[in-house]
Image: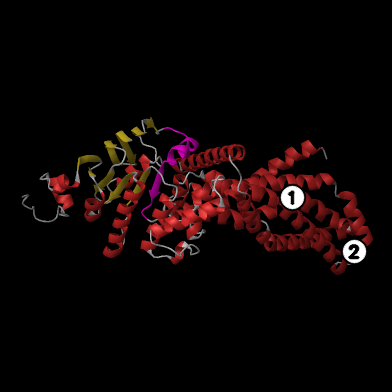
Amino acid sequence: MNRIARHFVSDLLEFAGGAALLAKETVQSLFVTRVSWNEVVRQLHFIGVKSQSVVLITGAFTGMVMCAQTYFQFHKVKMDTATLAVVSVSMASELGPVLTSLMVAGRIGASIAAELGTMRVTEQIDALRTLAAHPVDYLVVPRMIAILVAMPLLTAESIAVGIGAGYMIGVHLLNIDAAYLWHNTAHYTAPVDMMMGFTKSICFGAIIGLVGCYKGLSCSHGAEGVGKSTTESVVYASITILISNFFLTLVLQRLLGQ
Amino acid sequence: MIDVRQLSKRFGEQQVLKEVDLSIERGDSAVVIGASGGGKSVLLKHIIGLMTPDSGQVLIDGRNIVGLSERELIRVRSKFGLVFQMAALFDSLTVAENVGFVLNRDPKLTRAEIDRRIARVLDLVELEGTEQKKPADLSGGMRKRVGIARAIVYEPEILLYDEPTTGLDPVVSDSIDHLIMRVCRELKGTSVVVTHDMRTARRVGNKLFLLHEGRIHASGPPEELFASKDPVVYRFVNGISDASNDPQIP
């Protein structure tokens, strides 16, 4: 048991140290090399455009179920018209960024780790290094820029669709008065909630990109190594997102002074 | 030009290189021979700075590259071209994009100049007309040729070949041997070939090094090593395993 715990702690420290060094190298790279904007656009299309369907479905159904559940409770105390306000605040500050990030971690984090991991085991990363290209400049920086741009946009979409879907359910299925429903939503949803959501989405984007790239670049040899890296990138990114979400909520609440 | 001093490398319990000493002069065509899994590729990767040794030095033009940062190594590596054992082509790029990878990143070169140089090296490796193909559409021999084209297109001073003929049929191996000799003649640079193919070693090298049990066991011109009466050298160059009856060394 003791040995398992030591192994876990050692793995965790190795991961944290490696990811921190990669983050430092990525920031340095932004100042010393020319960014390949063509590659950034290609990644933006893959990360942003192609993730939309997953993110939109997640946002819509989360907004719908959240609206229904809130209504079932609020109806007991005659607060039906406050239903969408709860959905709106929750989607903007918590559910929108967290669920979007978890979906993107599953789709993009895994894809980045698998792509870079395969490049590593087939010596393409070594080939890059021999061709005078730094792997961080060529592979990590465009992906990081793309994910940092795409995440707030995907999160905004998810929030908007979630609130819209909640509104449709509230008005058309649960027969809540549309004018009061909308009035309360606008009244209780503050710009701070949106700011909190967008700030979180940027932090979560950085986590997904960094974990995916680190796991891919540090992949051990063989098909088994690629599979392990891919799985670990999703698990590590998801856990890191959920843990950091708690601390970000506390810090941002204090900083933004709601 | 390339000076390896007391180089040691261990992977876990296995000591792959044991205080290896090796010196290659400018213009040499050196061949490192040795058993499979004997550390030849590891030695090659240390020469180009892809691996860090446990101890020892690798001097390129008198400068020790051990301990340099990755960004410093990038400058050193611009002198090198490496042909990988499995070609290591970028599978998302076309043949032309693979070959022109370094040139495309040079802002001083025009599109026309890049295209002209890509066409010239593809002509040299006899792969004209394959510019728009993806690596997945190529045979093993063609991939090796593209790998060679990618390594020579920017005319490096030192060319390294990691098992250039492994896994190829004898006819394609023969064509790769001739290509290596042709590249040596045309570029007039230094080349280091790692192989366990004795025909390749005899043809392309003017200096042979036998890596045995992690050390350079013997070195010299090909004719000297192929005529050697040292049991280790004799067994290796004649392909005699320990399992066979002890041969009489002439």
Where residue B228 sits, quadrant-wise, is top left
Q: Which mark is residue B97?
A: none
x, y (%) of residue B75? 47, 38
x, y (%) of residue B145? 38, 58
Q: Secondary structure at mark 2?
A: loop
The one nearer the camera, A183 or B82, is B82
Q: Which residues are magenta?
A: B67-85
Q: In which quadrant of the rendered image does the N terminus of chain B lie?
A: top left
The one nearer the camera, B6 or B84, is B84
Q: Chain of mark 1?
A: A
The one nearer the camera, A56 or B71, is B71
User: Is A47 located above or below residue A257 in the figure?
Assistant: below
Residue at left offset 43%, top offset 41%:
B77
Amino acid type indicated by mark 1: Glu
Q: Chain of mark 2?
A: A
Going by the image, does A66 lie left or right of A132? right
Magenta stretch: residue B72 in it? yes
Q: Which mark is residue A176?
A: 2
Amino acid type indicated by mark 2: Ile
- Residue B165 appears in the picture as rendered: no
Q: Which mark is residue A94?
A: 1
